[in-house]
Amino acid sequence: MAKTDFKSVDEYQDTFQGEKKQRLATIRSIIREAAPQAEEVISYQIPAYKYFGFLVYYSAATNHISLSYPFSEALLAEFRTELSKYKMSKSAIQFPDKDPLPTDLIRRIVEYRVKENEAAEASRPQKSKKK
């Protein structure tokens, strides 16, 4: 992957071939279905989705694909059992290329993030309109 000034998710994904490219397309499709209202952007030179703030990012590495964002303690607790088989940090989950993508898990994580962002937005003080 030589290019590093991506303007779109298509540009990013087009730098990959074969199975890696297909796995990226699958994750993109899941995110679009689970969060159709989210805006697709490039942030830190990887695909990202915004809906009341950043929702999730994803990226490809040599032997895995990562789903990332600074995940909440609540999200990590909710999916603890399912996530235990993956290498992860508080901000990234690595899905090894040698294993099938856990599409249902990815969908549920994105849906959970949508609810978190909606709740955070609802709890923000509303700005009053000046007359």
Image (cartoon, helix red, strand yellow):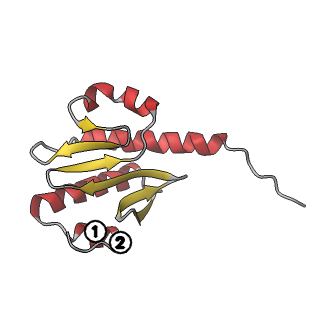
Residue 106: image quadrant is top left
User: Residue at the location (29% across, 70% down)?
Assistant: 10
Quarter of the figure that contains the N terminus: bottom left
Q: Is residue 124 above or below residue 28?
A: above
Q: Is residue 64 above or below residue 86?
A: below
User: Residue at the location (49% across, 40% down)?
Assistant: 115
Three-letter residue code for mark 2: Ser
On residue 99, which mark appears? Answer: none
- Image marks 1 and 2: residues in contact by CB distance under 8 Å: yes
CA gap between label 1 and label 2 equals: 7 Å
Quarter of the figure that contains the C terminus: bottom right
Q: How many marks?
A: 2
User: Residue at the location (32% across, 38% down)?
Assistant: 89
Helix, strand or loop at label 2? It is loop
Three-letter residue code for mark 1: Tyr
Which is more toward the observer, 79 or 36? 79
Q: Position of residue 67 (x, y in %)?
A: 31, 48
User: Residue at the location (34% across, 74% down)?
Assistant: 5
Residue that numbered label 2 is attached to: 8
Residue that numbered label 1 is attached to: 12
Say few, some or many: other residues with alpha carbon within 10 Å of mark 2 (under 14 / 14 to 19 / 20 or more): some
Q: Position of residue 125 (x, y in %)?
A: 72, 44
